[in-house]
Image (spheres, helix red, strand yellow):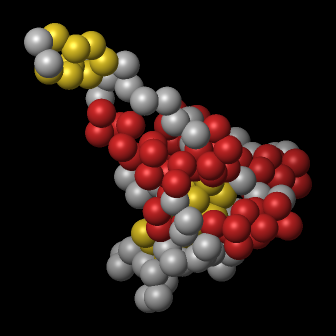
């Protein structure tokens, strides 16, 4: 029988809420040596992820979009809405202001592990978020979880 995500995922992962202060989230990431935290609301529903990538804006800041002026009109050469989102991340003080909300990759616990690994590779993500039918977070599957499974089950790793 093929291995499912439920057999390998981290159950009851460490989470934060949108109102969690960034400094607290940074401490949790550092203390637990993890690269991201799921963000859930008071009911346990998945709302986003705060990752090291999201936090880099705090240190690096943002560069205003390039523009040209023609006859007193500003013409942006890049998307100004993207700049506004990046600026908001750079200045945010809470997890909710900085977290990634879009393009979250979620799957069900009964998803085959092999397909989950392929999905992670194709989407170039470090983690998959495991949710129930109501959108409540029940686990996280990381690349590290898969590698540890492969190491402990060399005969099962490809099934």
Would residue 106 appear left or right of 66 to someone viewing this image?
right
| Spot occupied by residue 42 in the image (x, y as percentages of width and height) | 47, 88
Q: How many marks?
A: 0
Residue ranking furthest to the bottom: 43
Seen from the viewer's position, the closer of residues 105 and 69 is 69
Query: Residue 96 location, x and y as percent?
Result: 47, 67
149 left or right of 56? right
Q: Is residue 72 left or right of residue 14?
A: left
Residue lying at 38% horizontally and 37% vertically, measured from the top left: 83
Q: Nearer the viewer, residue 105 or 72?
A: 72
Q: Nearer the viewer, residue 94 or 144?
A: 94
Residue placed furthest toward the front: 72
Of 118 and 76, nearer the camera is 76
- Residue 28, above or below 134: above
Q: Where, by quadrant of the figure, is residue 145 drawn?
A: bottom right
Residue beneath the point at 71% across and 53% down: 35
- Residue 128, position as x, y percentages in the image: 56, 55
Residue 114: tell me if it is visible.
no
Residue at screen point 46% across, 62% down: 97
- Residue at (87% x, 48% y) in the render: 151
Question: What residue occupies the far left of the structure in this picture?
Answer: 71
**Above/below status of 65 relative to 98:** above
The answer to whether residue 19 is above or below residue 23 is below
Residue 56, by quadrant, is: top right
Q: Is residue 125 left or right of residue 10?
A: left
- Residue 106 lies, in percent from the top left, at 45, 58
């Amino acid at each position: 029988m093929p291995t499912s995500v439920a057999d390998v995922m981290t159950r009851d992962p460490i989470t934060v809420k949108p109102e969690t202060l960034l400094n607290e989230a940074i401490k949790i990431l550092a203390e637990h040596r993890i690269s991201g935290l799921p963000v859930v609301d008071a009911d346990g529903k998945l709302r986003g992820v705060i990752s090291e990538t999201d936090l880099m804006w705090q240190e690096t800041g943002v560069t205003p979009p390039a523009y040209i002026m023609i006859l007193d009109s500003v013409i942006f050469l890049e998307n100004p809405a993207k700049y506004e989102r990046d600026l908001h991340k750079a200045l945010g003080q809470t997890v909710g202001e900085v977290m990634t909300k879009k393009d979250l990759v979620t799957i069900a616990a009964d998803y085959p592990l092999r397909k989950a690994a392929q999905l992670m590779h194709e989407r170039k993500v470090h983690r998959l978020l495991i949710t129930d039918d109501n959108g409540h977070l029940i686990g996280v599957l990381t690349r590290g979880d898969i590698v540890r499974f492969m190491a402990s089950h060399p005969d099962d790793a490809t099934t």
